[in-house]
Image (spheres, coloured by chain):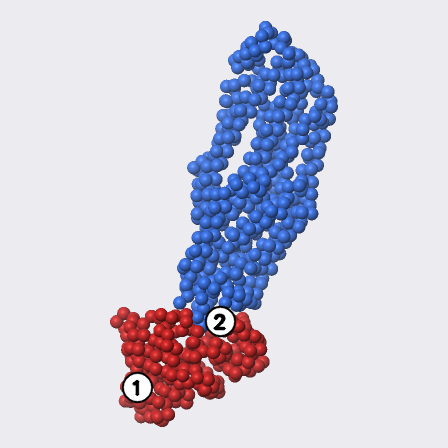
Chain colours: A red, B blue
Amino acid sequence: MIITNNLTKKYGRQIALDHLNLNVKEGEIYCLLGANGAGKTTTINLLLGFIEPTSGSAFVNQLDVQQNLRATKQFLAYIPENLMLYPSLTAVENLDYFSGIAGKKLSTSVLKDFLEEAGLQTDAFEKRISTFSKGMRQKVGIAIALAKEAKVLLLDEPTSGLDPKASNEFSLLLQKLRTKGVATLMATHDLFRAKEVASHIGIMKDGQLKQQFVADDISLSKLEQVYLNTMDYNELTV
Amino acid sequence: MIAKTFLKETKQLLRDGRVRIAMIMVFSLLGIAVWISTRQYQNVNEQYAMAKTAERAIWDSQGEKNPHSAAHYGTYAFKPKYPLSLIDQGVDKYAGTSIFLEAHNRNEAQFSAAADQTGLARFGDLTPDFILLFIIPLLIILLGYNSFTKEREMGTLTLLKSQGISSFKWIWGKWLALITPIFSITFVLFLIAGLVLSNLKDFGVFNWNTIIVMFLVYIVFYAVFINIVLVISARAKKSGISLVLGLGVWIVACLLAPKMATNIAQVKHPYPTAQEFAEAVQEDKDKGLDGHNPWNEEAQELERAVLAEYGVDSLSQLPFNFDGYIMQKGEEHQAEVYFKHYNYLKKQYGKQTQVYQTLAVLSPFLPTRFLSMSLANTDYGTHWHFNDAAEKYRIATQKFLNDHFAESTEYGDWGWKADASYWKELPQFDYDPPTLASTLSQNTSNVALLGGWFVLSFGLLFLTVKIK
C-alpha cells in the first residue's frame, strides 16, 4: 500500500532522506523510529506530496505520488504531532468539513458514529474544539481518517504530549484500524509505543533506514539496545 | 467542497465577536444614514416644490409690464433633488440648487447646501455613499484579511492539503463566504432605499432599473476589493502583515488615488478663475452686438441690413419694432459668447475626466465613484446638463419676450406694456435628467474600467493562489 523506491531528498548539500526503500502492506503498522532530523517527517511529507523528492519515487495504493498528487490523497489520512482543527467549530462540524473536502457526504448521525468509534465522549460531539485537549483532537483526527475510509494512515509523532491513558487509547484505535486493513506509517520517538502497536519497526538515522524488524521478532529491551547502538548512544548507557 | 467551505467560513465569521460587532455597527450606521438622507431628501423636495410654485406665481403676477422689464425682472430655474441622491449625494452639496434666469446674462447656479453649513461640515456627512464607498471596503478587509493566513497560523492548512483540497473550490468557498455578508448588507440598504423612494413624491423620475444598476456597480466594486484582500491574505506570511497591507490598499485606493487624480487633473487642465472667466466673457460680448446700444458698430450694421432687406428708409417703416428685434439679436450674440466659454469649461471638464479615468488603473474606487454619482444624477455631468437646460430655457424666454415686444409695438414705443395675463403663456421650466441609457452610454469608459478591474482581480486571485 505504501512503497518507496530509493526515495531521496536533498536540501542543497544536506541529505534529508537517503535512498529509502519501504513497503508497508495492508493491515500493517510500520513504525519509523529515530532521533530528530533522522528523516521520518521528510518521508511522511514526501508521501503526502508536500515536497518533491530529489530522486526516487513514492507510491500510495500503486499510484506514483508526484504524478497523482490529488488522486493519492483520496487514500491517505494524516495526523500530525499536533493536529490543529478549527477552534470555533464543534467536533461534528470539523469532521463534517474535513470529510466533505475529501468528497464524503455524511449525515450528522454517521459523523457522530465515527466520532464515537474514534473514542470521543458523546458529550463532546457538539462542543467547540477550542475546549478540547490534545488527546481529544487526535481522536477527531482518527474520526476524520475513519470517515474518509482511508487505506493509508500517516502519523507523525501522534502520541507526543499525550498522557498515558490517552496514548493507550490511541494505540487501541490504531489496532482497530489495522483490523480494517489500513496500512499505517507512524513516525515516533516512543519505543514502547512502537513495540506495542507496530507490526514492523524501522530505525532511521541521518536520512537512512539503518535497521528494520518484524515487531514480534524483537523484544522491547532488544529493540532499545539496537536503537541505542544505531544512534551511537551505547557509550552513554549504563 | 465550495458549499462546505462557504458554510465553514460563514460559521467562523458569525462566531467571531469582532465580526459581529463590526456588522452591527455597519448596519446601524447604514440605518442612520438612510434615515438622515430620507429626511433631507423629503425636506429639499418640499422646499423645491414650494419654491418652484412660489416663483412661478411671482412671474405670473407681474402685472402689466414691458416685456424687456420682465426679462430683467427674471425668474429662477430650480434643480430638483433626484431620488438616488438619497444613496449618493455626489457634488450636489457644492453645485448650487437654483439659477437666476435674466436678460443678457447666463448666471451660475447658486445657494449650495455646503454654503449654509457650519465649519463642522469639514468633518463630512454620514451618508449612505460614505458607508458604501469607504466603510464597507474596510469591513471587507476586517472579514477577509486572515482568510488564508489563519489556515497557516492555526495549522489547519496541513490537514486541508492532506485531504486533497482543490485550490479552485477552496478559493470560491472563501470568496462566497466574504461576498455573502457584504451582498446582504448592500442588498438590504438598496432595498430599503428603493422602497422608501418608491413611496415618496419624487417628480416621477425614480425607477427600479437605475437602483438595480447602481447596486450591481457596488457589488462589482466589492468583488474587486474581496479579490484583492484574498490575494494579499494568500501571499502574506502573517495575518498582521495581511491586515496592514489591506489597509494600505484601502488608503491608496479610496483616499490617495482620488485626491491625486483631482490634483493632477486640476494642475494639468485648470479651470479659469471666476474673474478670468467673467473678463473673457465680457471681452467677447463687447466685440459683438449690444441690443441696448443702437450706436455700436454691429447695431448700425444690423440696422442697415434690416432696412435693406425690407426695402425701407427708416426703422419706423418696418412691420415690427426694431428695438425688440435688435434686443433679440443682442441676446443671440450673448448666448453664443456664453456657449463658447461654457463649452471651453466643458472641454476642460472632459480632459479632467480623462485624467481620472487614466488614474482609475490605480484604483477601482474612481470608476465606481463616477458611475455611482452619474446614476444618482448628482455628478458634474448632470449639473452641466441642468445648466444647459436652464440656459436653453433662458434663451427661449428672452425670445418669447423680445418677439412679443417686437411684434406688438412700433419702433420707439418703449412705454408699451404687455397684458398682465401674457406672462402665463411662458411655458414652465421642466427639467428632465439624463435617462439610464444615456447615463450608461456616457459612462462606457467607467463601466469598462470597473469591468477590467473585475476580470483582472479574479484572474490574479485564481492564478496566484495555489495550494499544493
Residue B236: percent from left, percent from top? 42, 62
- In primary-sequence order, the first of circles 1 and 2 is 2
Which chain hosts label 2? A
Other-residue count near label 2 (Cα within 10 Å), few / some / many at <14 / 14–19 / ≥20:
some
Judge by depth and name the residue closer to the eye, A213 or A4: A4
- Outermost front residue: A62
Residue, disc 1: A211
Residue B383: percent from left, percent from top? 57, 37
Looking at the image, is mark 1 or mark 2 nearer the viewer?
2
Q: Measuring 48% from the left and 76% from the top, which residue is drawn there? A: A148
- Asked where in the image residue B358 lies, by quadrant, the reply is top left
Judge by depth and name the residue closer to the eye, B220 or A180: A180
Marks 1, 2 in one chain: yes
Amino acid type shown at disc 1: Gln
Residue B353: percent from left, percent from top? 48, 40
Left or right placement of residue B198 versus residue B352 in this view: right
Which chain hosts label 1? A
Q: Measuring 52% from the left and 61% from the top, which residue is drawn there? A: B176
- Asked where in the image residue B165 lies, by quadrant, the reply is bottom left
Amino acid type shown at disc 2: Gly
Label 2's element? loop
Q: Measuring 47% from the left and 65% from the top, which residue is drawn there? A: B170
Label 1's element? strand
Q: Is residue A42 visible?
A: no
Q: Is B438 situated above or below A20?
A: above
Residue, disc 2: A103
Q: Is A85 situated above or below B294?
A: below
Judge by depth and name the residue closer to the eye, B115 or B355: B355
